[in-house]
Amino acid sequence: MNNFKHIGKDFIPHDVVAKVTGAAKYAEDFRADGMVFCRLLTSPMPHARVKNIDATEALKMEGVLGMITADDIPAGPPGFAPSLTKEPMYVGEPILAVAALSEQAAEDAIEKIKIDYEPLPFTFDPLESLFPGGKDARSDGFNIGTLAGLPPGTIKWTAADFARVKDGELPMGKPAEEWNFGDVEAQFKQCKVVYEERFVTAALAHHSMEPRSCMSYWQNGKCFVHASLQSQSFALPPLAQMLGIKPEEVVLIAEYCGGGFGSKGSAYPCMVIPAYLSKKIGKPVMMRISRAEEYYLGSARNAFQGSIKVGFDAAGKLLAADVYVVQDSGAHISFWDYRAFGDALALVYQPKAMRWRGIPVFCNAPTRTAQRGPGQNQLACIMEPLVDRAARELKLDRVEIRKRNNPVNGSLAGGAEGKRGPVSSAYIKEALDKGRARFNWDERKKKSGQKNGPRVTGVGIGQAFHPAGFSGFDGLMCLKPDGKLHIHTGVGNLGTFSHSGTARVAAEVLKMDWENCVIERGDSRRNLPWNIGQFGSNTSYTMTRTNYVAAQDAVAKLKEIAAQDLGGKPDDYDIDGSKVFARANPSKSLGYGDAAKRAIALGGKFDGHDLPADINPMTQASAKAIAGTGLVGVAKDNLPSSGQPAAFAACFIEIELDLETGMHRIVDLVSVADCGTVIHPMGLATQIKGGAVQGVGMATLERLVYDPQNGLPANVGLHQQKPPSYLDLPTEMFTDAVDKADPTNPVGAKGVGEPLMGASAAALLCAISDALGGHVFNRTPVLPDMIVNHVAGRPQPRKPLSINTQ
Amino acid sequence: MSQPTAAQIATGYSRREFIKRVIASGAAVSAAAYMYGGLTGCSRKGRAAGGVERLISLNVNGQVRRVDVLPNETLAMTLRYKLGLTGTKLGCDRGECGACTVIIDDITYNSCSTLTHTVRTRKVLTIEGLAGPNGELHPVQKAFVEELAPQCGFCTPGQVMSACALLKHNPKPTRDQARLAMSGNLCRCGAYDNYLNGVMRAATEGAGGVA
């Protein structure tokens, strides 16, 4: 497809006006007749067993309606976070919930509940849990495990494995998983420079602005859930499972979501608490989550302790890499950041040989989950400063050394020998070139190290990667007798406007004006197809495909109807956006609205009564519900898909670093995306900038800290966690895109959200390193005190492998 | 108490002044302030923190509204749970994020940290009160739409209110002045640059004279 009517053009998404007027309804904005409130009793200890709960007095109090505990909610699979627990494994883990006429009454009742806790050992250091006989975060015998492919298990290292710890080295005992390709030792021998470093990346909260409040009630055999979710259709089956009912018995309303960044990707345990309470007391229940509770329930990025050894030849080519990642996974099953770290290294820098080893270990911190660029962005933060170190030592330009290693179309993504597959497209070199020109890198790098009083200029480049799409989901749309196209989309509303950007592909295929398109989304009663969630930088790729195939189905049906009514073969006909007409005689035509009426009259496949066999049952049900109301376009995405869609980003930053205070000021920031064909330029620009903002936080501001003696969280407020504010960013930010089509997507699109954060985080860390003459901290975040200590030649208070407690 | 000057507003006035006012008015913001107690009128008698509801008049968005208010009730809760004005968002309920920003007598306030009883004689303007009589968007709202300023949208009402107050006091701010004035409003999506674009566009289009 070329000469697009909609793709690559700006438009006003339908939900933006509601956002600026306050009309947009988030979970806590809904009310129901007779609605009451609930409050949670959360654990005051990092690990304990609840031996007894005495709520006798509490339940007699005025206004108190009922209570649920872990006994009232079926347990999930082993290792996964429960909704309510009898063995809390972090401070803030919910133990019970009380419903009352008011929050005050619920809170007063909770004060009267007597709980007998048996304190249990706790740990915030994965290495402690791996030490033979060391303390474990859980009492079920499991100390490792991750979301997919690694069920909960136990690994203990030997005392001999820890021999090097006293020198500050990472012990590297038996990994949970590993892979390698090429001859790593042989390649290291060819290297001109080899760096072997241990590193730490801190956990940081997602802190979405909307805490995950939720309101639920039961009506006519269905459970209504008003939730804060990034995803719509994808979250429904797991939510139903947690509620112990069928997916069709859940009404899920998630039209707006006040930020998620990975933490609201699918159904999460606490969101069923109001539903279970509502079932018990027979009233709608609103659960408002406080900001502090959001730090307990809202997830965080996995933290790492690791070792990285990389070797470059004299030309700056990365020949070999050997990495070991110990992931601090929090108390329950978490995401596989540690894998993504290795995969991203193998792809972005294309080493000739590499070994990756990893182990995800539980500790008594709140549940961790995927956060924008899970693993890939930690890799960017650790690897990019090392690339600069090599460039400095080998006297190479920093753009050039990156381009010498970067992948191109068809380059292999990470993984074991024989299991590596190609990427669908890779234009990171082009992104670097665009950034280089836009930032005026060649001139600006000369400012590196320039002093102005105590302030030193530093410039840095960062690059990052994330997989960028899936295939195999369904598209559903209906052309109505009034000529309007209703595009049903089961994707969520994370704030990227991609629910609409990708829906415009349907308008593109049908050549329709956007004014004649209506988007159906955000509420499972709107008959939505089976779509994957809005996470993993996938929407732009995945949903352009589903909308493309369903629209193609609609076009085929339009032509068939025209051929039936007006004579000839379907191929004799074409469409122009409002009618289907005979190519040979354009006056022989049928308007879209009339064709929709004919579709209804014809029935069968035309109006959705006969459906393709390969679509998901959820799509089947939705299509059946709209059958007979127009011409239904419905199809599963069976388009060819060769290679892993891959998104890349590059970022260039100039800073002034004050050596006396350790504070930096970003003077300029330019970020460039390789996201395939640009679908929605303004939407892309704001994503690029937003990713860059989060990268600034990851690199220099945000971390979770716990008191090692009592296991209490030290920072559960925005002012302590320090997500970036207006004043942490330059007054103006600049963006660009490569805008080269991905060959495996019908409109050339692929996702990009996540690497934008990693690229800016890495660029900022590299700029700080540059201002310090090349010093690399091998740790995130880099805090002002670290800089001041370094400048003064003082030892750093944080030990090289210390994690979570400083 | 003296009103803050426009210069104070443009340079990030507010929380300190707010705290001073609360202390001076004899009320204390306690940790219990976020607990909501009045939806069904089940006030709990004899509680120090709770007390009983009083029927008061509030001037909100140009209308006088009669409402029962607890002594410890915050303006955000009155707006959201008693007046149905859910456009004002609660992001932290402790004056850190700015999502609950409203304008009271032309000055921005965190409504989560403002006791409703303290605004009885004053004019409260919320996000719902900005649009014109026929629903036409306020120039700041219009500019935010045109600049695609929001992402997830949760902090947006607060951002809009801060921008309106800024432009009222300083109709032609520099981008740097706007950045300072808006800095009490956090946005985790990181849409700051787009919000600033919106403020500058609204200023160009003369939003300062409105609302």
Image: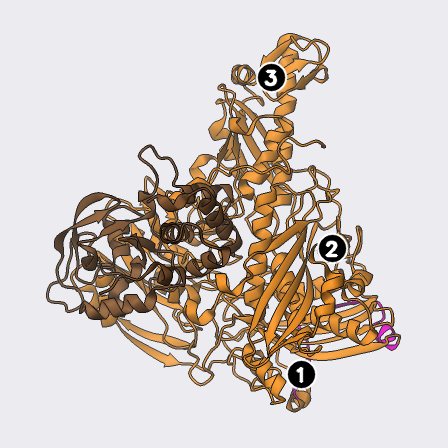
* Residue type highlighted by circle 1: Pro
In the picture of the structure, the residue carrying the numbered disc 3 is A579
What amino acid is labelled 2 in the image? Ala
What residue range appears in magenta? A168-189
Mark 1 element type: loop
Pick whichever of labels 3 and 2 is earlier in the sequence.
2
Colour in which chain B is shown? brown
Circle 3: element type: strand
Q: Residue at x 59, y 39 (%)?
A: A502
Mark 2 belongs to chain: A
Q: CA distance from mark 3 to mark 1?
A: 69 Å
3 and 2 marks in contact (CB < 8 Å): no
Residue A31 in picture, x, y percent from top left: 29, 46
Residue B21 on the magenta span: no
Disc marking residue A437: 2
Disc 3 to disc 2, C-alpha distance = 46 Å
Mark in the foreground, 2 or 1: 2
Chain letter of the residue beneath label 3 in the structure image: A
- Give chain A's shade: orange
Residue at (52, 65) in percent of width and height? A728
- Residue flagged by tag 3: what amino acid is it? Lys
Q: Quadrant of the N terminus of chain A?
A: top right
Q: Which mark is residue A171?
A: 1
The disc, 2 or 1, on the residue closer to the chain's N-terminal end is 1
Q: Earlier in the sequence, mark 3 or mark 1?
A: 1
The mark closer to the camera, 3 or 1, is: 3
